[in-house]
Amino acid sequence: MPAVLRAAPETVKIGMIHPVTGPLAFGGGQCRLGGQIAVADLNDVGGIKSLGGAKVEAVLGDAQGKAEIASGLVDQMAEQKVAGITGCYASNLALAVTQTAAKYSIPVSIDSGIADSITSRGLANVFRFFPDNTTMTNQAIACLDALNKGAGSPAKSAVIVHENSEFGTSTAKLLATKLAGIGIAAKETIGHATPTRDFTNIALRIKAQAPDLVLITNYPNEYQLLLRTLYQQKVDLVAAYSVSGGGFNLPFAKDQPAVSANMIDYNHWYNPHDPRAEAFRKRVEAAGHVFGWEVLFGYFAVRVLADAIERAGSADADRVIPAFAASTWHDDWLPYGPTRFVNGQNQGARGLGLQIQDADIKVIWPGDFADAKPVFPRPKAG
Amino acid sequence: MTALLLPAIVGGLLTGGVYALVALGLTLIYGVLHIVNFAHGALLMAAMFGAWLLAAKLGLDPLLALPLLTAAMFAVGWALYRFVIGPVSRGQDRAILLATLGVAVVIDNGALMLFTGDSRTIETPYALAMLQAGPLLLPEAKLIAFVCALLLAALLWAFMALTDTGRAIRAVAREPEGAMLVGIRPQRMFALAYGIGTACLGAAACLLLPSFYVSPQVGESFVLIAFTIVVLGGMGSFPGALVGGLLVGVTENLGGLYLGESLGPICVPLLFIAVLLLRPTGLFGAAR
């Protein structure tokens, strides 16, 4: 008699919705890349073991930066019976995707949408492993306060510059309300559109205000154009400090060393003391890709979702969602501690204070994770 | 605010110079030939990647690369019209529109595949350099672009007004049948004009790159404003494209200064509507 034939385990499909074309293509592409690496890693170690080693298959969707397209992709992925969705790089896309996914009860693992409202609307299918905007902004303020007080409080005033969609506007509002509590007066808040082609006007307005700090929250191209213009207009600052700065990345540090030098960002990053994190970065770079924090986002959004499917022993939403909610997933690559979801938001998630030094990104705060000392205040503008 | 007025106007003029560079090629293609060239932004992006490759991989400064890239883009534009847009469209406006849209999609996605969505910049000795002029700090890269925009507008005007080829292109645009009767071959003129318009993008790319970034989406940042400038300045008018570009640059800056960066952008559409209400053919457009 032949051996008992066993059916090959079915594939577990994970949808990935990101803007990989359009103005947000860089960040969206980075998130997708991280997700694809996670899928490859999962399959390399035997797939979903509780499902008989079922392989994980990525179902890719390009949201093009448009909420209606992102929402339509959820409908398509529901027809393809995905076990869960990760995405969506931008908050407005994540809001649309989570709303539509709720209709089908598809679990959504948010990667880089930071707006609080993504998880605060009470949708049971939505989980964010990464910090929300309020957490990031509160921590960013604590980091700024520590850096300022550590240097004898040279910074007493700030101008806030933000892009004018949900992400930038909500962050700027939070910053404006928190600054007074650490002894820094917000002189002006300036919003701008994406894309903005020229920042001379804004730089001159900042220069006229003569603040000690410029606080920035916007997307990559505008981030770098703004800093470039501030540099050219010789705007003298104690520090330029961004919160979730879209353009704070390694290519910026390497390609524009003069402009990027000593830029501080409060953002997502890996624990530099964990050798696996450094090895992951080298692996991404060796494959010819840019390594940015969005890659980590995409990677871990898939890993925590796959962990929930693994523990659920099923790809059915009815079982994956409770398993996701009960996650205690823990990996020291990220400075998070064990996962604990409250209303879909991981309570241990946090960012780190980062600074570009010697054309590289260094962790400067908090001390437990730091691998460099902060340059604060920065040297006077030439 | 008063202290910022002069810098805002000068800054607007410099930015307007950059807009004019992009609009000059378009006014030839859209304004003279009436081809709604959806590929204009994509071709600008392709030219900027060309300038970036020459700078980043071969160390060729964009200003030195300008003649080379202008010639290369002329060849690209001419070939595109001669072998793709012309044969596909068979002279029908609607088909031309769809053909240029198709070309744009192919170029955009080709760039995304080749270069991914990353933004890239280059460092040149003058990219960050500033010229102190009294109280003003002027970026040298934009000053160079501004002067070149003036030169390019003058050259194009002279070419179209003073040479036989320029006159032939205008003749084809106005009276194609009449032009054929005197021995002008319209499709050759169309291909030539499309090539010249695309060549302008080669020059614009070299002048833009030191002060901007390039990504597969960069064309979208300029193409809508370029169409606005062409109509505002007067279809087919090179002085119109130049003055329109400068006016739009200054309006944008003053709008941002007085209304804020979020509300400020409405000033350009308002200016556009106001000009067309008063002068339906645009600032320098000839009445028909």
Image (cartoon, coloured by chain):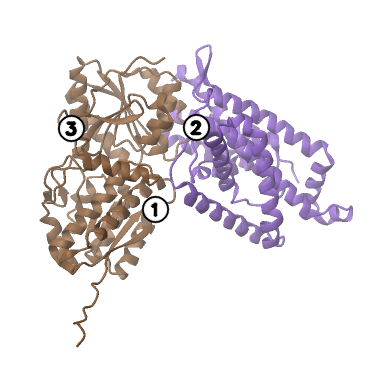
Chain colours: A brown, B purple
Label count reads 3
Q: Which residue is mark 3?
A: A369
For marks 3 and 1, give the CA distance: 37 Å
Decide which of B240, B144 is in the foreground and name it.
B144
**Contact, mark 3 vs mark 1 (Cβ under 8 Å):** no
Q: In the image, A230: left or right of B12?
A: left
Label 3 environment density (alpha carbons within 10 Å; few <14, some 14–19, many ≥20): some
Q: Which residue is mark 1?
A: A66
Q: Is disc 3 placed on a helix, strand or loop?
A: loop
Q: Is disc 1 placed on a helix, strand or loop?
A: loop
Specify the quadrant of the image occupied by residue A206. top left
Q: In the image, A171: left or right of A63?
A: left
- Residue B122 has which mark? 2
Label 1 environment density (alpha carbons within 10 Å; few <14, some 14–19, many ≥20): some
Seen at 81% across and 43% down, the residue is B165
Which residue lies most toward the bottom here? A1
Amino acid type at circle 1 is Lys
Q: In the image, A195: left or right of B95?
A: left
